[in-house]
Image (cartoon, coloured by chain):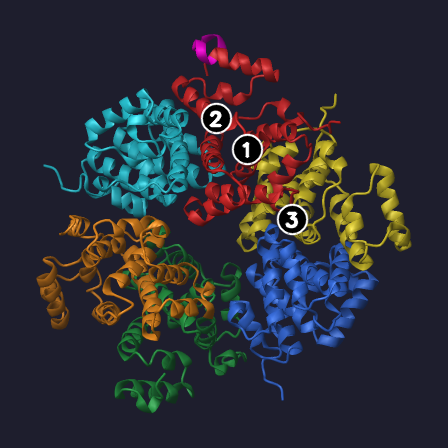
Chain colours: A cyan, B red, C yellow, D blue, E green, F orange
Amino acid sequence: MPDPVELPADLAERIAAVADKSGFVPNIFRALAWRPAEWRAFFDYHDALMDKESPALSKADRELIVVVTSAANDCLYCVVAHGAIVRIRARDPHLADQVAVDWRKAALSAPQRVMLDVALMLAVDPASVGADDLERLDAAGFSQDDIWDIGSIAALFALSNRLAHWAAVPPNDEFYLLGRERRE
Amino acid sequence: MPDPVELPADLAERIAAVADKSGFVPNIFRALAWRPAEWRAFFDYHDALMDKESPALSKADRELIVVVTSAANDCLYCVVAHGAIVRIRARDPHLADQVAVDWRKAALSAPQRVMLDVALMLAVDPASVGADDLERLDAAGFSQDDIWDIGSIAALFALSNRLAHWAAVPPNDEFYLLGRERRE
Amino acid sequence: MPDPVELPADLAERIAAVADKSGFVPNIFRALAWRPAEWRAFFDYHDALMDKESPALSKADRELIVVVTSAANDCLYCVVAHGAIVRIRARDPHLADQVAVDWRKAALSAPQRVMLDVALMLAVDPASVGADDLERLDAAGFSQDDIWDIGSIAALFALSNRLAHWAAVPPNDEFYLLGRERRE
Amino acid sequence: MPDPVELPADLAERIAAVADKSGFVPNIFRALAWRPAEWRAFFDYHDALMDKESPALSKADRELIVVVTSAANDCLYCVVAHGAIVRIRARDPHLADQVAVDWRKAALSAPQRVMLDVALMLAVDPASVGADDLERLDAAGFSQDDIWDIGSIAALFALSNRLAHWAAVPPNDEFYLLGRERRE
Amino acid sequence: MPDPVELPADLAERIAAVADKSGFVPNIFRALAWRPAEWRAFFDYHDALMDKESPALSKADRELIVVVTSAANDCLYCVVAHGAIVRIRARDPHLADQVAVDWRKAALSAPQRVMLDVALMLAVDPASVGADDLERLDAAGFSQDDIWDIGSIAALFALSNRLAHWAAVPPNDEFYLLGRERRE
Amino acid sequence: MPDPVELPADLAERIAAVADKSGFVPNIFRALAWRPAEWRAFFDYHDALMDKESPALSKADRELIVVVTSAANDCLYCVVAHGAIVRIRARDPHLADQVAVDWRKAALSAPQRVMLDVALMLAVDPASVGADDLERLDAAGFSQDDIWDIGSIAALFALSNRLAHWAAVPPNDEFYLLGRERRE
């Protein structure tokens, strides 16, 4: 991988912004950087789906989809990195581990259960998803925009998990500990 | 979905270019267009991986990866649309159907077999891919760039297959018949 | 395999009749011919189930069962050869490919969906079929004769698919193109 | 099902011969009899494969293939009825139960292990069988005729198991006890 | 394994009691005896769950759970040994073979079906068991003690099946024939 | 569950000893306590296998087997509780999460890889374990005692995971954070 000083200016700038905010550069940003066109496409896609929220689909909910589908794909990077984000966004130090191992027994709302059930179907057996599943999401209170986002997040991390496996990207050490202390 | 006349100018231009070249607008271009940022990311990623070739990894080989992994995901749109492209690029009216149903018995070169075997592992059981699989690709004559592309194509269509299932995008009628006559 | 001139007279006669009607000899007729007793049993069984129709179970429906269960078994010969017959009998150039890849999203009638769902259960997980599944077929309007035929067709092609895999029987080139032009 | 007195003469004659030899009429003979053409095809196929033996493939070996593949399909009729035949033909009161539950730990010869391994691949994942598997059988001492028989027996019982599940044919009580006493 | 004369006194005494009652020493008692602490824990656990009965959960029912879950784990020792006990306790020479191969088509009561369905879920896919499954058991008439026992028996034989596979413990010859004659 | 003051004296004493050492009572001790005979058997079995070590099989190795097989069974209690013990015994704050999600890409020794590979086979597909797997463990340097322990630990936690699912035992909050700071 090229050193950050050699990165195209737009990548260097976006990576610096992440480092400023997080205090470190998540490894996935470096692992994809030797292919700038793919890097831009990946993070543009990511930001379009993850940096938003709606009344029924919070940022924490979006991260829960990532953790549960990534766990089904045995993707260490995504489970650990997005598990940290779940802990922070949901202000819950245990929820990420709970859904990563056994989401069905976790303390989730009824709409969250439908959301994760359908997202997981798309992640592991995509042909099994049918119109009735989209109707279940609609009945659970998700808007058409939310429904599109739920499927798209599961689909994007189907890509992301496979890239992380292919390139054997390890999580940064920082992610393991982030958000583990209960906050008042 | 918004009508094409309402599309952002850059999308309208790229779609017009495809229509000029193909004689019709593949349905996936319309199905994603109501989300322009995701549309751009998806097709930028696609073009970065598919519109290129190398001595060991032709454009037809790239399409074979798409057909085989999409068949494993039961994705009608991708099997039919990219099957048509395989027929044209490989100048073979039967190969696409053969690999879609049973690639192991198809007439493929030894490197193509390794390529499809590893791509399929990544598609259906991503944690099963290990360093030894990348070494098998290297030993089969693929460059480091080729190896990255093989995994990335399987990963991108893990996303694409799931979007097509989620939005129930049907293949255009044109794709079913393209390239089925043997060319002299 | 023995040359057709060496075939027992009854096989030669039946093969000639098929060639007259189809314009070519489907490869499966030659592949099994070196075992005349098994050949006779196989084609007698086939004809008893496939060369008939009832108000609820047309010849095209029977072929749909073949294509869907054969696709589940990754059997190229049966998917391509019986896909051609579906195109001709259903007068639809796209339906065979649609059901072979993802029958659940295909445009089928409600009885056809029950028929394919139960036939596929018998094909891939036979112990999962119970009395309630036969009742579902009855409720969908199939007669007791139809129900017997549905299960028997799935069972016969469980045999047929395995013979085709074992002997690596390729489809004739003719099958790939048959029925692909939409008929007025 | 029609009563035996109403059976076509050829079926009645063949069933009487079986009853003479076995002391009872195995239920499968009655369950299929209401469809005489299918009955004839089924038992002709069966007899062509099972009523023969070769130096490397005994009648007991053929029955072992039936028991192991039928167990994989959870088919009670075939496991119990052909288990009885294994006990008698192999003169071993325990072997049938052993291979039905866990053939891998049973006391079998090396060629029998290859035979069962490949037959089971064909039974449960037919596309996984390749030319190398046929070569393994060849290397284990099976003739080309034997190899054809091994695959055909697995294929025929793929059909038979499904018919027995579909019609819910129970084993005759007699089968459970046959051959269970060790013979001197 | 140490010879019985070398066994700790408590093991020797308990084994002698079993031999007195059964007429032979089941192989599992010897196979675990070189680890006396584990032996005691295993048989204490076993006796606490299996040597009891309640109005809704007889000793025969408990053995049915063992046979069905052990069959799912392909455990010859447990299927054969506990199949013998089912034959004796249920006074039925066929039921054990029936449930071992295909419990869904066996002649069982409605509560037995719920019992086996849930026990099997716990045996083969433990995370799939939820509060609704325990409610199904409650609705079928099982007490809270019974429900605990049902799950614990499935769990204990998850252990037992794996020990028998690991140590390749064969069933005693005696088990194969026990209880096979119908008793008046 | 009975309150600790009502517990049989031996259980109360052993639970008090654990509380003294750990600073809290792990929930599994309370969840099983209403069945004292089963409680004793379970913890006796546990201590016989886990409170020991050998040159090739450390206490941390034993806990790794627990975490990897419990993750395969989606058992939150065991993954979180024994993950904490791995962090402490291996003096590594990341290893438990790594092996729980994707042990194949974790930094493990060659013997540890064989140990986990075979233990996982026994956990998820017990019939697949054969004599060659025990030989692989032997060749990796494990003694006969170690090999017995490896299989027995996988078997015991097959039981333990199922009890925890059945009783829906949650991990204590303390486990989530234990051992997460890197120690000098």
Residue D173 x/y as whole percent: 60, 72
Nearest the eye: C165 or A120 = C165
Amino acid type for the residue under numbered disc 1: Arg
Residue C22 x/y as whole percent: 82, 37
Res D122 visible: yes
Location of residue F168 with respect to D59 vertically, above or below: above
Mark 3 sits on what residue? C154
Location of residue E150 with respect to B146 vertically, above or below: below
Q: Which of the chains bears the disc numbered 3?
A: C
Amino acid type for the residue under numbered disc 2: His
Mark 2 sits on what residue? B46
- Whole-number angstrom distance, CA of label 1 to CA of label 3: 35 Å
Location of residue D11 with respect to C143 vertically, above or below: below
- The part of the chain drawn in magenta is B3-11
- Whole-number angstrom distance, CA of label 3 to CA of label 2: 40 Å
Is mark 3 in CB contact (under 8 Å) with mark 2?
A: no
Nearest the eye: B57 or F82 = B57
Residue F39 x/y as whole percent: 22, 68
- Whole-number angstrom distance, CA of label 1 to CA of label 2: 11 Å
Is mark 1 in CB contact (under 8 Å) with mark 2?
A: no
Amino acid type for the residue under numbered disc 3: Ala
B12 part of magenta stretch: no
Q: Dot 3: what SS?
A: helix
Q: Which of the chains bears the disc numbered 2?
A: B
Mark 1 sits on what residue? B62
Is mark 1 in CB contact (under 8 Å) with mark 3?
A: no
Comparing marks 3 and 2, which lies closer to the viewer? 2
Location of residue D86 with respect to B147 vertically, above or below: below
Nearest the eye: A133 or B105 = B105
